[in-house]
Image: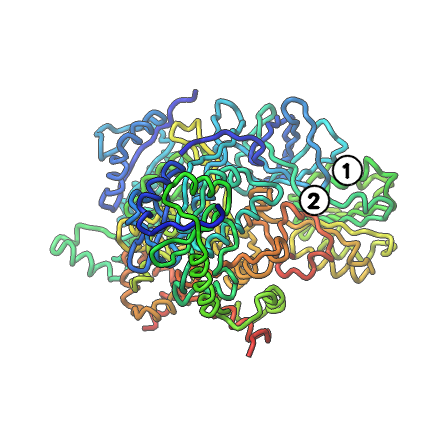
Amino acid sequence: MEKIRISHTGYEVREARILRVTRLTESDKLFELALVGGEILDFEPGQFVEVSLVGIGEAPISLSSSPTQRKSFELCVRAVGRLTHALHRLEPGDVVGIRGPFGVGFPITKLIGHDLLLVAGGIGLAPLRSLIKYILDNRRDFGRVHVLFGCRDPQNLLFQDEIEEWQRRMDVGFQCTVDRADPDWKGNVGLVTSLIPGIDINPEETFAVMVGPPVMYRFVIAELLKKGIPESQIVLSLERHMKCGLGKCGHCQIHDIYCCQDGPVFFYERIKNLKGAI
Amino acid sequence: MEYAVLPKSALGSFVDALRQYGKVIAPVAKSERHFAFEEVTDARDIALKYIPTILPPKKYFMPQYETLAEYDIREGQKLYPVVEVEHIVLFGVHTCDLAGIQCLDVVFSDRPKDLNYLVRRGYVTIIGLECNEYCDQYASCGLMGTFLPQGGYDLFFTDLGDYFFVHVGTQRGEDIVANFSLFQRAESRHFWDLQLLRAKKAEIFRPEVPVDRFLLPRMFQEGFEAKVWEDVGNRCLSCANCTNVCPTCYCFDVKDVMNLDLRTGKRIRVWDSCQNEPFAKIASGESFRAERSDRKRHRFNRKFSYPVKRYNRFFCTGCGRCSRVCMAKIDLKETIAQLARETGYLKV
Amino acid sequence: MMKAPKVAFFDFTCCEGCQLQVANLGELLLELLDSIDLVEFRETMSERWDGVYDVAIVEGSITTPHDVARIRKIRERSKTLIAYGSCATIGGVNGMKNAFDLEEIKRYVYGESAKFFETLPTKPVHEVVPVEYFVHGCPVYQPEFLEVLKCALLGIPYHVPDVAVCVECKFNENVCFYERGITCLGPITRAGCNSWCINNGNICYGCRGMVSNPNEKGFLEVLRQYGISLEFLLRRMDMYNACRILKGAGMVYEEKRAH
């Protein structure tokens, strides 16, 4: 058996150095990275990268920062598997491998000029944060912006400092709720769906964008439709285990769709009849 | 010369001559009813009459374990992509398996291209071999229309008694024929023999299930909630035999293997299967095809519906391997028939 | 370069066959010894060590009060614990005694001297102390043992494949026993052994334990089709998986009780 070195196979990585690590919750950390050599990672909010550590493997992680940040990018990582646990042990200065970005991000060009209702559940805030920050950096491009975020309990609240900042801003309506409060919690208690009826929007002008677990999608979509938002203006991101990112390995397939290439962001219309999608 | 004939008596020396193009791989008997593609050094070991091998030839195009890249942790996170190749000559590939290789070609040529597959493919010479009759009751090449050659080979052999009729499909095939003196130009009587065989085959090879092939994608769409899925789901043991032996199943897992020095190692891909319990699990532990019925339906749709939409091609080649190897006796033809009955697509 | 990790092997109720597999690694063992500091290994050395073990590798099941005390002590002194071999990971052959009255069993084995021996129902190691890594098999499959040890040394998890032995068996292009009319436990036993037994002409005895969610109902139906009695199969299953019966896991066992 002859071994040939080849290039551009889709499996090579670019090295990225960790600039900063911030602990967000007991099991989540935010990594700020920059490609070694100064190259800029060219991505869209909603896309993901495969993070690689040789000897350990790869895991798909969605980009958490806005591309407007340019010099560096951020990944919010929950320690759940082999690679993510290993990532949590790394420190600033350490290097990881990056493949991608992959997939189709949020349809920003279609969102421009419209009102937006952004909904995140749990770790879904990580990819949605990329869009939120992009919008705030290009605030004039968009109409009214509402952000709703629901999470299990106050201990699992991601990006607390930023949430406080978003809540203070006058150009975005940010509301947050927890399923279970603790004695210190002063905010809303209940599912994120409970916030939707109270939002004042013009449904014809509004695009809803959401990222969260399937169970949240089912209930939020019902509320959005009740609000009168057309199916063609509902956008969501589907979580699957993208192993190759190249539309081949089959792990992220839903019917004839490869999430890693055709998604992970879809218009609701596209996937609503695909059983098992949400 | 586009058509040639080779006397059967010359097969031995032809196989010897093939060795200059690479390791010769051909079907050999593992038992009376079991065959496998293996290296042969003696043409007498080749099973000229064989039912589909346990594993299809895909193992030479995307091996069970395949190195994608190598690393050395002393060099940080750098990965060096590699492809392991070997010149081989696949002799005796049936038309169903040629169709299977064509399916893989399509998938891996689709963007983003898969260089590991495409580079390796260039090292393989393919010599097809016609089935003159049905292999066994599991085949459905009549339904899938794969019992006749439709390209995908360098040379194609048809056994016509004391000689092989040979179609030359590529320049590589032409070079092989030109370099071996025992090939003769095909004459009209040879074409006549071939036509006779093909006419006979057209009578034998009929759709094994009375459904219209071109309506299958629609039937699978409409039958998404059919009872048949629950039924096969209850019987399925999730052993993944059906996907591993399928000539067009190409799903894989990617993982790292460290060498004992704990410094160097490789990133490999390994065949994986949508029938395996953990296949569609995500980080949180949720599985999007938790039920066996979901997984079985997914597999069938990946043969008869999804790829037709995406690549305009059926990914079932009618080889019958999945039915042959299923210990729960989930039969592809029966499943299609049952679905057709439920959805009203069964022709009466 | 950091100091070589201290690695020790221990055995409980077992045949020490798994240690033999390790001793038989040959050249690989020498290569492995480059990266570790082997401090205890009864099969090949007599030295003892009284410090902290980076990796303790434990063979055998826990079957006496003395075993319980000893494994707890080992655990206290070990940063990482690997249970290896069916006896340690699933109870293995030793689990068979759990189907009998313990006093009766004691008398059967030790006769007159039974009163000198204390005994407990067989337990796999993880039912007594926490275990980080599992290497299933009777005996362990050498390449998997090495894979797990590498993971332990690198501090990354090893996931036992939760897929059937059939998967690897097909990779190896074996002729399926079912096609020859012989039943085999491959379809419900978890992979990772590279279908070692079947490659060598034997059936799978299920020594690695079952996959997490076997289709027991479907499997019974397959047995029925092949004319195999449930009783026959359960006896075969019990050889290694008897410990599971105690937990009442799965309907094959429920049905057995009903019989």
Q: Give the crowd class for mark 1: few <14, some 14-19, many >=20 residues within 10 Å.
A: many
In the depicted structure, whether residue A241 falls above or below residue A87: below
Label 2 SS: loop
Q: Give the crowd class for mark 2: few <14, some 14-19, many >=20 residues within 10 Å.
A: many
The residue marked by circle 1 belongs to what chain? A
- Quadrant housing the C terminus of chain C: bottom left
Decide which of tag 1 and tag 2 comes sooner along the chain.
Answer: 2
**Is residue B130 found left or right of A21 in the rendered image?**
left
Tell me the kind of residue under disc 1. Lys
> Disc 1 marks which residue?
A133
**Residue A150 locus on image (x, y percent):** 71, 50
**Is residue A226 found left or right of B16 in the rendered image?**
right
State the colouring used for the structure image.
rainbow
**Residue B195 locus on image (x, y percent):** 46, 62
**Residue B34 locus on image (x, y percent):** 33, 57
Residue C163, label in figure: none
> Disc 2 marks which residue?
A104
Q: Is residue C163 visible?
A: no
